[in-house]
Amino acid sequence: MSTSSTPQGAGQLETRGIEPVPEAECNGHPLQLFWVWFAANISILGLPLGATLVAFQHLAIWQTIVVAVVGAVGSFAVVGVTSIAGRRGRAPSLTLSRAIFGVRGNIGPTIVSLMSRLGWETVNSTTAAFVLLSLFSILFGTPTEAKNAPIMTLVFIAVFVLLTLSVSGLGHATLLVIQRLSTYVFGVLNIIVGAFLLVHIDWNAVWSATPAPTSAMIIGIGTMAAGTGIGWANAGADMSRYQHRSVRAGGLVASAAFGAGIPLVLLITLGGLLSVGNDSLASATDPIAAIRELLPTWMAVPYLLTAFGGLLLSNNLSVYSAGLTTLTLGLKIKRVHAVIVDIVVIFAGSIYFMLIADSFYGPFITFISLLAVPITAWVGIFVVDLLHRHFYSPTDLLNVSPTSAYWYKGGIEWRAFGAWALAIVLGFSFTSIATSADNVLFRGPLADSWFGHNGLGWVVTFIVAGGVYAALGGCRDRRPAQLQGSAHAG
């Protein structure tokens, strides 16, 4: 990977990999991140998330709004907190995690984070290909079912991943510009499409709906947090590493919480409104087609373009982050080549979802449930570590040999790794994973407890991970942050 210190502009290839950014190049500000997070969350997938709250948890619309605010805005506030580490250490999230878990101990969290990124990218790519199938069926009368048009499906997946590569491959500066400008275009289109969808809402049913019990809201908050911010928490520092030293922590938290929260709350609420008395969206194998059926033909084309654009903006950021995470595993390749490796993986995953698997959202929910536990455990430890750690040694972050200050014992910081492992075991004990009501893949021994029944295993995981790490001594490095040019291993 390159160690070039030459600043990269929009349209130029970012040659930096996971090495910390020199202080002279750190001129970013929170508004840039606001647009990055906003763009990444105007995806149409917010609609079926809201639909599940009403159709399956039977929430009233005011409850859906509360759940969306607490679950989505709250979980992205955590993303903002993890972004603080990027401003301090100038490196990607999982690279900074080496200082916490050790050079070898960090491999586990890195693999989980990479799986999370690749999973979301596969979901985005699959949904985007469904969008193009629907669009072509309107314009040219082609089949809408992927298995009835396998060649077209392969072409559409390829188009989406190549468009993603064109932005994520170029890197940070290009990503900032594309995400901001595209937000204006696709944000306006989302408003127009949303206005047309409003006419399909049964307002009498909305206002007369009986509120669900508090326990259903608690479950909903957990589902929203796992399906939104928690999945991005391990990418917070990937973008904030270019922020100026003077940027305050509160600005980073607000940029993520409100940047992602505003579009998510609106989309989740609209999805909930559409599902009052009609669970077709929540149970749809192809959510794109389910929404398409609610619109007049002349409105379907701008709707599908809006959906495609939102998915692409989300994928741009995710693939960029996945490339950095791949490099953290130790691959001796350039960042752009790591992005290409990730693109190949999600292309294969999308083929499976569209041409082999029998359902879409069953595997999707299962995927969220599985990875939310170890990611939440990592977040708990990472956040607690931030309380004391203000300094990350640039040299030692990149040194994977026993001479690194972050080698600890055998390459593992056992307090962090042990707390992570314990929290994962306990978290899965409260977890039940199923692809449908009749197909339970896993049920933990505590899944029927109050925490398990209310979907709060992730909360237990977070508290146990951070609490155990703190109780064992946690981070004791209280050195103040230094300019990267003068920083050295202590």
Image (cartoon, rainbow, N blue to C red):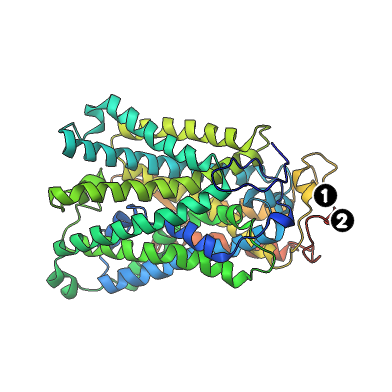
| Residue ID for mark 1 | 405
Residue that extends furthest to the top in the rendered view of this protein: 151
Question: Is residue 277 found left or right of 308 in the rendered image?
Answer: left
Q: Nearer the viewer, residue 485 or 283?
A: 485
The numbered dot on residue 490 is 2
Q: Amino acid at mark 2?
A: Gly
Q: Could you tell me if residue 370 is visible in this image?
A: yes
Q: Amino acid at mark 1?
A: Ala
Residue 393 image point, x, y percent: 79, 53
* Residue 383: quadrant of the picture: bottom right
* SS type, badge 1: loop
Q: Are marks 2 and 1 in contact (CB under 8 Å)?
A: yes
Q: Nearer the viewer, mark 2 or mark 1?
A: 2
Q: Nearer the viewer, residue 14 or 89?
A: 14
Q: Nearer the viewer, residue 440 or 27?
A: 27
Vertical comparison of 282 with 462: above or below: above
For marks 2 and 1, the one nearer the N-term is: 1
